[in-house]
Image (tube, helix red, strand yellow):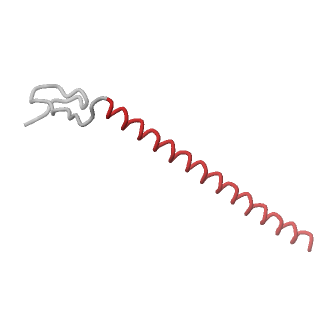
Amino acid sequence: MLFRYQKAIQNAFREVDDSLISQGKSREELFVEKEHVKSLERALLALYKSMGGSWVCPPPQYGERDQSRGYLPTL
């Protein structure tokens, strides 16, 4: 009976240790993903600036087809 109790305690410690390791790996992965997103945002901003930046596409006039939405604007 004492042996089973010791085994249960050891298993509990092992499960806690595994969970802590898994949590640490998840945090590392999240950090890497956040850095990747920041890098992509910087690249998009650089691209936007290199193409002149701050341009605005005029809205389609009545009767013209809006290519991005696929319908005609209404009055």
The quarter of the rendered structure image containing the N terminus is: bottom right
Residue at image position (41%, 40%) is 42
Whether residue 35 is visible = yes
Question: In the shown orientation, is residue 21 left or right of residue 30?
Answer: right
Quarter where residue 65 is shown: top left
Q: Name the side, left or right, on which 66 lies relative to 46.
A: left
User: Residue at coordinates 23% horizontally, 28% vertically from top-left?
Assistant: 70
Indicate the quadrant where residue 59 lies. top left
Instruction: Name the residue: 46% across, 44% down.
Output: 38
Query: Which quadrant would the C terminus be assigned to in this image?
Result: top left
Image check: 65 left or right of 31? left
Labels in figure, total = 0
Question: Which residue occupies the foreground of this view, 49 or 40?
Answer: 49
Residue 54, image x and y in percent? 24, 37
Q: Is 1 in front, or is 65?
A: 65
Q: Please identify the residue farthest to the bottom as the structure is shown.
A: 2
Q: Is residue 53 above or below residue 26?
A: above
**Among all residues in the image, which is located at the extreme left?**
75
Residue 1 seen in render: no
Q: Position of residue 28 (x, y in %)?
A: 61, 50
- x then y, percent, for residue 50: 33, 30
Task: Please tell me whether residue 51 is drawn above or below residue 11 in the rendered image.
Answer: above
Give the image quarter of residue 10: bottom right
Which residue is at a point 16% across and 32% down the rendered structure image? 58
Q: Nearer the viewer, residue 35 or 75?
A: 35
Relative vertical location of residue 3 with respect to residue 22 in this rendering, above or below: below
Task: Using residue 54 as the reference point, say whether residue 64 is left or right of it.
Answer: left
